[in-house]
Amino acid sequence: MATESTPRILPTEITPESVYERRREFLKGSLALALYAALPAQAALPAWKKTAWGRDESPNTWEEVTTYNNFYEFGTGKDDPAKNAGSLRTRPWTVSVEGACLKPRTWDIDALTKAFPLEERIYRMRCVEGWSMVIPWLGFPLGELLKQAQPTGRAKYVEFASLYDPKQMPGQRWPVLDWPYAEGLRLDEAMHPLTLLSVGIYGRELPNQNGAPIRLVVPWKYGFKSAKSIVRIRLVEKPPATAWNRAAPGEYGFYSNVNPEVDHPRWSQARERRIGEFFKRKTLMFNGYGDQVASLYTGMDLRRYF
Ligand SMILES: Nc1nc2c(c(=O)[nH]1)N[C@H]1C(S)=C(S)[C@@H](COP(=O)(O)O)O[C@H]1N2
Ligand SMILES: [Mo]
C-alpha cells in the first residue's frame, strides 16, 4: 500500500507490461483487461530499451495482433496461424548470415538475441490487402547484424528465407507459394536504421503466429516484405527472387513500398482499414515514413519499380 514514505515510482521504473495495461485500460476499459488476463505463457525477454518510435500511436491489442495474421505456412485464413502455429518448434534455431561477406556466421537464436541490444519501437504496419495495425516490436536493426558480417563490394541485395519444414508447417504441403517463403531487400534498404529484426512484441517473445523466433520488420513496405521465422540471410549481387513476385509478378513487385498512388491491379491502395476501427483511413506514402526513407528512391519511377 502506498504511504508518504513509499518512494515515488518513476515512469522509467514502471514495467512495460504495466504501461501497456494502463494504456489498454484507458483505451478499451475492462474488456481489454479481461483479454490481457488471457495472455498465453510467453516468456519475457531480457533487458530492452524503450525508444520514442511511435509513442504517439495507439497500438492494436495483443488479441488483435496475435489472432489476425498472415502466415501462409499455417493456412490462408486470418485466424489459421493462431490456431495452427503451435506445431512450430522455435528451439533449437539457427540463423545463418552468408554470401558476399567476409564474416559469414551461423547464429544460435539465443546468442543472436543477446549480441544486439534490444529496443522497442511502435511501428505502423500496412498489409497489401488493405488493412493495417500498430505493433510494439522488440528487436534490433538488421543493419547491425549485417555490419558484423562485413559485406563485400559484391553485396548489393539481401535475400531472406523462412523455414522450410512441411512437418512443422502444414501449409507447405500445398503449393500456395513456392516454398520456402523468400523475400529480399536492396542492401541500402536492409541497412536502413528503420529495418528491424524482431524477436518480440509487447515485451514478450514473438508468438509463433507472428513469426517466431525471428522475423523482419520493414514498416514502409507492404507487410509481405517482412518475412517470418527466418533461417537464412544471404548477401547477393542480383535482386533475389521473392515468393510473392514469383506467384504473381504483375501484382507484387520487388520494392513493394507502400504507395497510395499506385493501385494493386485488382484494388485501390488509397485507403486502409486499421484493424479495430470502422472508418477507413487514407494510406500515407511510404506508410508515413517518407521523411526517413524517401531519399532511398530519389530519381526512381515508383510506378515502374512498384
Ligand atoms: N514466412 C512468411 N512470412 C510472412 C508471411 C507469410 O505468409 N509467410 N505473410 C506476410 C504478410 S502478407 C504480412 S501482412 C505479415 C503479417 O505479419 P503479422 O501477422 O505479424 O501481422 O507477415 C508477412 N510475412
Ligand atoms: Mo500482407
Image (cartoon, rainbow, N blue to C red):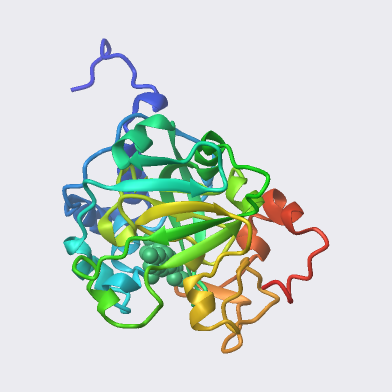
Q: Which quadrant of the view contains residue 290?
A: bottom right
Front in this rendered view, residue 89 or 289: 89
Apparent side of residue 41 relative to residue 113 in the rendered image (left or right):
left
Q: Residue furthest top?
A: 5
Q: Residue at coordinates 33% horizontally, 61% vertically from top-left?
A: 163
Q: Residue at coordinates 33% horizontally, 69% vertically from top-left?
A: 68
Q: Residue furthest bottom?
A: 266
Judge whether 194 appears above or below 304 on screen.
above
Front in this rendered view, residue 244 or 157: 157
| The C terminus lies in quadrant | bottom right
Judge whether 305 appears above or below 62 on screen.
below
Judge whether 267 appears above or below 110 on screen.
below
Q: Residue at coordinates 57% horizontally, 89% vertically from top-left?
A: 266
Return the x and y of residue 1 as percentages of the image width and height. 18, 23
Return the x and y of residue 303 as percentages of the image width and height. 73, 76
Q: How many marks?
A: 0
Front in this rendered view, residue 115 or 35: 115
Return the x and y of residue 195 as percentages of the image width and height. 55, 49
Apparent side of residue 141 relative to residue 138 in the rendered image (left or right):
right
Return the x and y of residue 298 as percentages of the image width and height. 80, 58
Apparent side of residue 266 relative to residue 299 in the rendered image (left or right):
left
Apparent side of residue 248 relative to residue 68 in the rendered image (left or right):
right
Q: Which quadrant of the view contains residue 60?
A: bottom left
**Residue 64 can be seen, yes or no:** yes
Q: Residue at coordinates 32% horizontally, 42% vertically from top-left?
A: 109
**Residue 201 can be seen, yes or no:** no
